[in-house]
Image: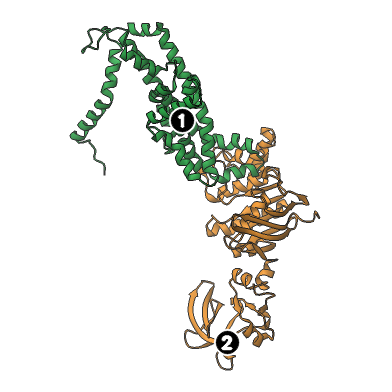
Chain colours: A orange, B green
């Protein structure tokens, strides 16, 4: 097992009774990487995280952390800590004792662990909150405490389960940046689970897209967004338009499924346009910075996103146009 | 909407209710001080503290009291261990027949004591277990477990499952997690359940009559005193003590669980 991987899963399956949550996945997370596991609910991403944390054991396959096989090792003997979706702060401890808990278990002296807890709280910009109880904190503050508690004992990998799921929009955006800078400051490997493609695209160095217990694609945000491997990834990551092989053969000369980003599509006059690309607008929604249109091209539904300033036709037939490079031919259908 | 003053009929009804509930109790207290020894004459011909001294001198009172305390303590302890374990199993894990088990655990408190008593007696007889201190304890444990279980299960349900996982994740093994995380969070529920169990066991009559051999717990002693009285007011003195010994833990349990809304299994 090469130690050049922070987390390595090989042929890992997890079966719950009749349900296969993970179906023989292989995954390597590099050291120091901010890695996202993206997928709809029930796709196996959380199970995957729990396998790394040790809360679940694989039905088959192996899990390794920095080259060390941890299959069958309980969570308390893994150098991995988790930030839980509901934060899981201990209600009977104050903030300082919550953060110092992992050190208390390691028999670190009281003065030392309180100093370490205070330092960790400072990293998440919560210094001076040590004496409060979790119940006295806001949601965002609780999450910072959970973060501080997870990093205080210097794990090798930090796992985050839907870290921003319970926060409101504004807080979520500032927290995204903060998580990124915290990860850089610590030089730690972060693995986080999310169902929000925007979150994964903006934070992660690399993304694994999960669907139905399998990994559909692993790649940089640009890879999965611009060059989706198949229809599922194209649709799930940024809801791309999917063009059928028949049309793609005419447009690009190859009989393959293709994805087309809504923002890459222009609206043009019908004259001289390919009849297959002529249709009518069926819906329009104003998104502030842009406008989203739904078009019906003879049965094929296509979405178009245009900047807000652009003058758009309101009725009558309309044609779409796009650069050849915008059309991404996918390797496989599913 | 709440009116400022209680309407008179309502106040009267409440007063009548209280009198009905607590009047007989007061009567018991009053007769503990009477100078009349053989029959309960109203009003008492005179008042005396003599019976407290007499009760103090009677070895049979002490023996019964100690036995009752011992039985209550041991069955409560047994119930604390078993009740907590069952509650943990039922609320923390999913397994086949879980709902059935949680119903079966509560059943003993719903069963009439006389049925429990007869069932235990015939079971002991069949297995040729001689009646002893331990058979009484087993009988009492049947309903003490329910009380502890009810308190613990309510608290376990409110305890987020991820707390245990978080503790393990941060480096605590099973024992450390129990000691540092679970116990502090269910402690007051266990204390409340334990006190109720103790109080229930301390004044139990029905199951005890079926499971005791020669032993006399305090309630059994009182029952016999009523049938064959020697110094009647001594019984009343002991009754006062029993009221105090059982009332205090129930009161404490009430205050401990007041803000939690846990259902304590009172009602045996």
Same chain for mark 1 and mark 2? The answer is no
Chain letter belonging to callout 2:
A
Closer to the camera: disc 1 or disc 2?
Answer: 1
Instruction: Please state which of residues B11 and A72 is positioned toward the viewer in this rendering.
Output: A72
The residue closer to the viewer here, B216 or B84, is B216
Element type at marker 2?
Answer: helix
Which image quarter: residue A319?
A: bottom right
A301 or A149, which lies in front? A301
The location of residue B98, given as percent across then percent down, is 50, 44
Q: What residue is disc 1 on?
A: B142
Asked where in the image residue B266 lies, by quadrant, the reply is: top left
Compared to residue A153, the image places residue A243 above or below, namely below
Give coordinates of residue B239: x percent, y percent.
35, 17
* Up/down of B160 relative to B229, above or below: below
Q: Is residue B172 left or right of residue B33?
A: right
Secondary structure category for the residue under label 1: helix
Residue A77: percent from left, percent from top: 71, 43
Q: Residue furthest bottom?
A: A272
- In the rendered structure, the answer to whether residue B204 lies left or right of residue A196 reads left
In the image, residue B206 sits, relative to residue A179, either above or below, namely above
Residue A277, numbered circle? 2
Quadrant position of the C terminus of chain B in the picture: top left
- Which label number is shown at residue A60? none
């Amino acid at each position: 097992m090469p130690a050049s991987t922070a987390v390595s899963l090989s042929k890992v399956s997890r079966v719950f009774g009749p349900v296969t949550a993970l179906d023989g996945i292989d995954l390597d997370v590099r050291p120091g990487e901010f890695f996202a596991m993206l997928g709809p609910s029930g796709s196996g991403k959380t199970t995957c995280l729990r396998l790394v944390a040790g809360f679940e054991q694989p039905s088959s396959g192996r899990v390794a952390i920095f080259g060390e096989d941890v299959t069958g090792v309980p969570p308390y003997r893994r150098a991995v800590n988790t930030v839980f979706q509901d934060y899981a702060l201990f209600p009977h401890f104050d903030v300082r004792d919550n953060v110092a808990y992992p050190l208390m278990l390691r028999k670190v002296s009281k003065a030392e662990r309180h100093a370490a807890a205070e330092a960790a709280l400072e990293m998440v910009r919560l210094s001076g909150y040590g004496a409060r109880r979790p119940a006295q904190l806001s949601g965002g503050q609780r999450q910072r405490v959970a973060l501080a508690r997870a990093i205080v004992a210097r794990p090798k990998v930090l796992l985050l389960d839907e870290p921003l799921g319970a926060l409101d929009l504004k807080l979520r955006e500032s927290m995204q940046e903060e998580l990124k800078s915290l990860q850089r400051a610590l030089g730690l490997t972060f693995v986080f689970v999310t169902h929000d493609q925007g979150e994964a695209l903006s934070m992660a160095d690399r993304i694994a897209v999960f669907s139905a217990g399998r990994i559909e694609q692993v790649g940089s945000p640009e890879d999965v967004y611009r060059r989706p491997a198949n229809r599922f990834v194209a649709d799930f990551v940024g809801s791309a338009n999917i063009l059928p092989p028949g049309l793609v053969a005419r447009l690009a000369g190859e009989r393959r499924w293709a994805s087309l980003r809504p923002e890459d599509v222009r609206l043009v006059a019908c004259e001289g346009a390919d009849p297959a690309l002529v249709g009518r607008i069926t819906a329009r929604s104003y998104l502030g910075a842009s406008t989203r249109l739904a078009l019906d091209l003879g049965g094929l539904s296509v979405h178009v996103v245009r900047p807000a300033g652009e003058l758009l036709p309101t009725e009558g037939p309309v044609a779409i146009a796009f650069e050849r490079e915008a059309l991404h031919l996918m390797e496989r259908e599913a | 909407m709440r009116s400022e003053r209680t309407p008179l009929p309502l106040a009267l009804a409440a007063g009548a209710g209280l009198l009905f509930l607590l009047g007989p109790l007061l009567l018991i207290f009053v007769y503990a001080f009477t100078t009349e020894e053989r029959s309960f004459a109203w009003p008492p011909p005179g008042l005396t503290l003599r019976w407290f001294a007499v009760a103090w001198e009677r070895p049979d009172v002490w023996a019964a009291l100690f036995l009752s305390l011992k039985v209550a303590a041991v069955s409560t302890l047994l119930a604390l261990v078993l009740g907590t374990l069952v509650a943990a199993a039922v609320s923390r894990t999913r397994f086949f027949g879980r709902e059935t088990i949680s119903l079966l655990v509560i059943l003993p408190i719903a069963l009439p004591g006389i049925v429990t008593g007869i069932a235990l007696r015939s079971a002991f007889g069949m297995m040729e277990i001689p009646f002893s201190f331990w058979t009484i304890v087993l009988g009492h444990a049947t309903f003490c477990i329910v009380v502890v279980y009810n308190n613990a299960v309510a608290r376990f349900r409110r305890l987020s499952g991820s707390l245990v996982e978080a503790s393990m994740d941060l480096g605590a093994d099973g024992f450390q997690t129990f000691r540092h995380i679970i116990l502090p969070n269910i402690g007051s529920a266990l204390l409340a359940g334990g006190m109720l169990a103790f109080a229930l066991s301390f004044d139990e009559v029905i199951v005890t009559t079926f499971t005791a051999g020669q032993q006399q717990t305090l309630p059994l002693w009182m029952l016999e005193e009523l049938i064959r009285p020697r110094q009647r007011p001594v019984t009343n003195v002991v009754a006062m003590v029993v009221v105090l010994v059982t009332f205090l833990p129930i009161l404490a349990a009430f205050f401990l669980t007041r803000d939690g809304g846990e259902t304590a299994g009172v009602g045996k």
